[in-house]
Amino acid sequence: MSPPDRRAAAVRNCWDAPRRVPRERRGSATYAAPCAIGDAGLRRAWQPAAFCGQRAAHAMILDGQIEIAPIRLHHAEGFRRVFDVVARERRYLAMLEAPPIDDVRQYIRESLEKDSPMVVALGDHAVIGWCDIRRDSVASRAHRGTLGMGVMPAWRGKGIGSRLIAATLQRARRAGFVRIELDVYTDNSRAVAFYEKFGFSREGVQRDACRIDGCYRDAIIMALVERTNAEA
């Protein structure tokens, strides 16, 4: 089956609606941690990623016409486009639009400098999804990171979300992350099930965590803890 064209891919936004779908599709829709991305920036389980040939060092995963690869600066505009589409849905992210392109480039630079896991999905010669884990900047919390991800709507239902999170968490394990956390709105039951499949547990609920278009929404706090990843 040929991939959707770019126009269809840009029509709407990312993470999955809270409707039931066949089990085999749950991991492929878009799930984003709604409050994992703060207004100050793009703040953001364990399954090993596949490696192949000389590209193993870059944690690239190829599957048909979809490629999962570590982000690079030249992906900035494509990443921003996907993020903006997801944000403007006003359903999944705390931010309601993408920040300026210069801020996005700076965010990517910092992620690369700090070796924070960040990968993109590439399809039809364009960025169609991302997943990243932002390490906490406080020294006593440097073992923690916040996860965020999203996939363009026309590319959902193809297992891209599962491949993105698997690749990102594999890199997080190698980087010594012990705790990965995120927030999910309580009405996004499908996203909750997706993260639970990857080992995340519910830790509590933030009441009135977000206010969009006059409506308050609660958020579930979820985390994945793996002390065996701690560096000696």
Image (tube, helix red, strand yellow):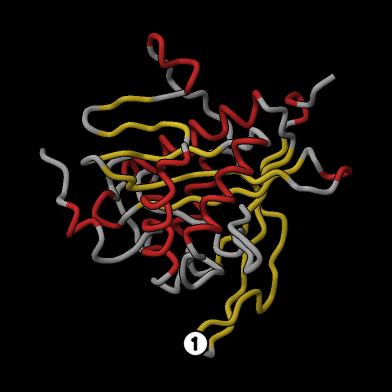
Q: Is residue 73 above or below residue 38?
A: above
What residue is shown with label 1? 213
* Residue shown at the point (25%, 60%) measured from the top left: 10
> Residue 183 location, x and y as percent?
62, 59
Query: For the residue marked with disc 1, what is the amino acid?
Result: Asp
Name the residue furthest top.
53
Q: Nearer the viewer, residue 214 or 122?
A: 122
Residue farthest right in this picture: 140
Q: Answer above or below: position of 169 versus 221.
A: above
Q: Secondary structure at mark 1?
A: loop
Q: Residue furthest front?
A: 102
The residue drawn where x is 52% and y is 57% is: 102
Q: Quadrant of the C terminus?
A: top right
Mark 1 nearby-residue class (10 Å; few <14, some 14–19, many ≥20): few
**Residue 52 x %, y %:** 38, 13
Residue most toward the left? 1
Q: Is residue 151 left or right of residue 209?
A: left
Q: Nearer the viewer, residue 200 or 173?
A: 173
Above or below residue 227? Residue 118 is below
Residue plotted at (10% across, 38% down): 1
Say which residue appears at 15% left-offset and 51% top-offset. 5
State the image coordinates of residue 206 (x, y, percent, origin top left): 70, 70
189 relative to 156 in the view: left or right = right
